[in-house]
Each structure stands twice: as C-alpha cells, then as structure tokens.
Amino acid sequence: MNLARAFPCARAEAFRSRVDRRAANGPAATTLFLAEETGEGWWEVEGSLDLCFAPGLGVLSSCCLQDGVTPVAALCRVARDGQGTLTGVIRNWPVHIDQGSDRRWALLLGPLPVHLTHQGDGLAPC
C-alpha cells in the first residue's frame, strides 16, 4: 500500500510513520492512563474531535443528538499516554426516548476519538 498516496495531508505524517513501524514490528501495546475530563482541557478534547473526525463530525447522527446538551461530567474520561499526551476521549450524553406519553432516559456514548498515532495500539494494564 502506498501510504503517501493514501494519506497525503501533512498532519498524517506521524500516522504513516507509525503504520510503517507496525508493518515491520507488529502492533505494540501502549499504557494509557484514564482521568476525569476537566473543563481546563476542553480545547484539547475539541482538537482531538477535529483531528479524528473533521470535516464530517457535524453530520454524525450522534452529534445531532448532542446539540445544546451538556455531557455527563462524572462519566467523561480522557486517556493520556506516558508523556501526558491526549490519546483518546470518552464522553457520555443524556438522551431521552419518547414513546407516546412514556419518556425514558438513556446514555449516548461517543463519538470516541482516538489519536491517529494510537489507533489500534490496544490497552495495557497500569
């Protein structure tokens, strides 16, 4: 596979290099640390969503359900590698399901961005 043609953008360079190493050495597990998402890191989370899903993020049906809704903070996590770099995000959103006069609440999980350089790495216990 010609990776230069498959991934022509400059920001995918790290991904291409990671894929080349995997082809030579096989996948390697990465230790990731989960922490609560804080309001201070919102820009990192939004950047991760843009990097992983842009430009099509706004057309995902899950994103339409999230418009004007705040995620459940107690259930939102960020994953960081050993250097403290944001590698993934887990968010849960409250949604209600109306069926006539019956309203039920549920949680919507996602979207789940994983940084391009860590996709397919797997998780190793801390």
Image (cartoon, rainbow, N blue to C red):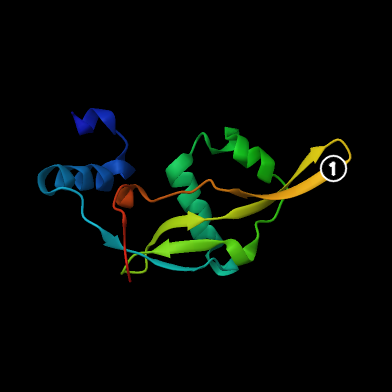
Q: Give the residue at x 56% y 68%.
A: 38
Task: Name which residue lies at 54% across and 38% down.
Answer: 57
- Which of these two is toward me, 74 or 69? 74
Height in image: 121 above or below 77?
Answer: above
- Residue 22: where, in percent of width, then height? 17, 46
Answer with left or right where residue 48 lies relative to residue 96.
left
Of 66 and 12, which appears nearest the observer? 66
Q: Give the residue furthest to the left.
A: 24
Q: Amino acid at mark 1?
A: Asp
| Crowding near the residue tagged with mark 1, few <14, some 14–19, many ≥20 C-alpha atoms within 10 Å | few
68 and 65: which is toward the camera: 65
Q: Secondary structure at mark 1?
A: strand
Q: Quadrant of residue 67?
A: top right
Q: x%, y% of residue 72? A: 65, 60
Residue 78 in picture, x, y percent from top left: 47, 62
Image coords of residue 11 (percent x, y): 33, 44
Please state if 68 lies on the left or on the right of 102 as rendered.
left
Q: Which quadrant of the rendered structure holds the C terminus? A: bottom left
Residue 30 left/right relative to 35:
left
Q: Is residue 67 left or right of residue 30?
A: right
Residue placed under numbered mark 1 in the picture: 102
Q: Is residue 24 above or below residue 81?
A: above
Residue at horizontal 56 percent and vertical 55 percent from the top: 91
- Residue 97 location, quadrant: top right
The quadrant of the image that shows the N terminus is top left
How many badges with numbers are in the image? Answer: 1
Residue drawn at x 69%, y 49% as measured from the top left: 106
